[in-house]
Image: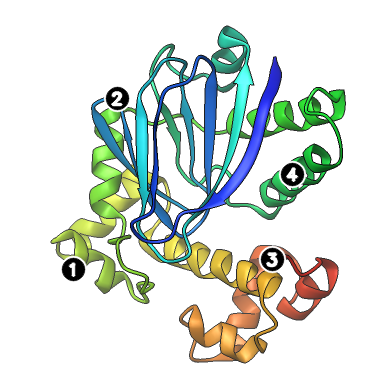
Amino acid sequence: MHVLFHGRGAYPNGARIGPNSWPHHDLLVAQRGAITMEVGRGEITMGAGDALLIPPGTQFSGEGRTTDAAIWVLHYRGYRAVEESVRAPRGHPALFRQALRSTFAANLLNEITLAAASGSLRDPYVNALAVALLARLAMWRPLGAEEVVEQNRLLPNKSRDAMPRRVADLARGAGLCGSHYRARFLKAFGETPRQYLQNLKVTKARRLLLETRLPIKEIAERVGYADVVAFHRAFAAANACTPGKYRQKAPLVA
């Protein structure tokens, strides 16, 4: 298995991706914002942390749905090795919802970027990092077509930049009552809508801490916390450190 290409790009609201079709596997990772991908005959909505593995010879295109939309791209050569490593259905796109939203995965992608920028993509170290990324995906089960449709309905409307702040907002967007929505969400994602919102807020907070010098109180408000103490508590529970220490440990990135 070898990495043929690595890159990343910003696709603000309305910016197009492709159309393309490549003779190798493409791994697309939503870094931030939201993107809609058309793969084969299906449509997939991706949010930060989602990964999409596209098999060789598959036509795909996409469009940014929010002003901050950005993706990472890795091209892999090694047909069977790639699909077998992540248990993906042979010859079909595989969506791994929220598989790469962790700090570990973000650091791994950053390391791949730095290594690729400073040397050849044929460097064994770069390939080892890329294989480690696939190993991370192997911890998640790829979704089937019906599951993707159900999840797209239950997730917030990602054509808007506004972040939902309450479970009631999510339910209203899906056109379901609160209890019915919570039951279907838990079945589809394996977590409650409240946990999903918490993770969504913490993920956006991590990005703002790394990419801006905004005061922590303002970041808390932007991600939906009126109480900065509650924000500190939720962030520390998810990251094993306070927002301030998280910002100190990681360099500011553009």
Q: Amino acid at mark 4?
A: Thr
Measured in 3D between alpha carbons, the distance from the residue under mark 2 to the one under mark 3, in whole angstroms, is 33 Å
Calculate the distance from the C-alpha at mark 4 to the C-alpha at mark 3. 13 Å
Percent x, y for residue 97? 45, 42
Q: Which mark is residue 172?
A: 1
Query: At label 2, which amino acid type do we have?
Result: Gly
The residue beneath circle 2 is 40
- Secondary structure at badge 3 equals loop
Circles 2 and 3: CB atoms closer than 8 Å: no
Residue holding disc 3 = 254
| CA distance for labels 1 and 4 | 39 Å
**Residue pointed to by mark 4:** 113
| Nearer to us: label 1 or label 2 | 2
In which quadrant is the N terminus drawn? top right
Lower sequence index among marks 1 and 2: 2
Q: Which residue is painted at 80% across and 22% down in the image?
A: 122
SS for tag 4?
Answer: helix
Q: Is residue 147 above or below residue 65?
A: above
Q: Nearer the viewer, residue 32 or 232?
A: 32
Under circle 1, the secondary element is helix
Crowding near the residue tagged with mark 1, few <14, some 14–19, many ≥20 C-alpha atoms within 10 Å: some
1 or 4: tag closer to the N-terminus: 4
